[in-house]
Amino acid sequence: KELCKQIKDHIGHLTVSCLREIQYFDVSSQVSLEAQRPFLLDKPDIVIGTPLRILAHMNDGNLDLKTSLKLLVIDEADLMFAFDHLNDIKSIL
């Protein structure tokens, strides 16, 4: 979750000078899925989150990666696989 916050902050700094507004949203915070749903329905350009939180939003119908995913970045992938998140990542894919 801390890494998600850092990524969100860096995206904010990187996109401040873009010609158009880049919408991004971090779903890793521990608020209800329903509270985050409106932000995902706006179809942000970038969604940041942990595998379990992304899956929860997919299962609730808040996030449809089949129609919108263009690129998936897994930061610290070696740790993700070492801590047995391989099945979660396969489910997302």
Image (tube, helix red, strand yellow):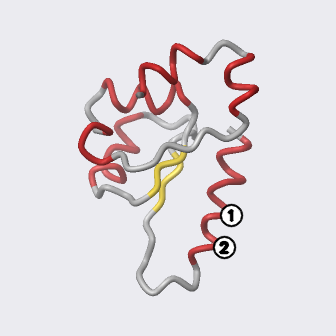
Q: Is residue 47 left or right of residue 40?
A: right
Q: Which residue occupies 26% across, 32% down?
A: 61
Element carrying mark 1: helix
Q: Which residue occupies 45% across, 71% down?
A: 22
Disc 2 versus disc 1: distance between alpha carbons? 5 Å
Front residue of 68 and 7: 68
Q: Amino acid at mark 1?
A: His
> Where the N terminus falls, by quadrant?
top right
> Where the C terminus falls, by quadrant?
top left
Residue under label 2, please give it.
13
Q: Which residue occupies 61% across, 38% down?
A: 74
Front residue of 77 and 18: 77
Q: Amino acid at mark 2?
A: His
Front residue of 44 and 68: 68
- Are the two marked residues, 2 and 1, in contact with CB atoms closer than 8 angstroms? yes
Residue 76, which numbered label?
none
State the image quarter where residue 51 is shown: top right
Residue 67, x across and y down, in percent: 24, 43
Residue under label 1, please give it.
10
Residue 48, x across and y down, in percent: 54, 47
Badge 1: residue crowd in 10 Å (few <14, some 14–19, many ≥20): few
Residue 43, x across and y down, in percent: 31, 55
Q: Is residue 12 left or right of residue 35?
A: right
Badge 2: residue crowd in 10 Å (few <14, some 14–19, many ≥20): few
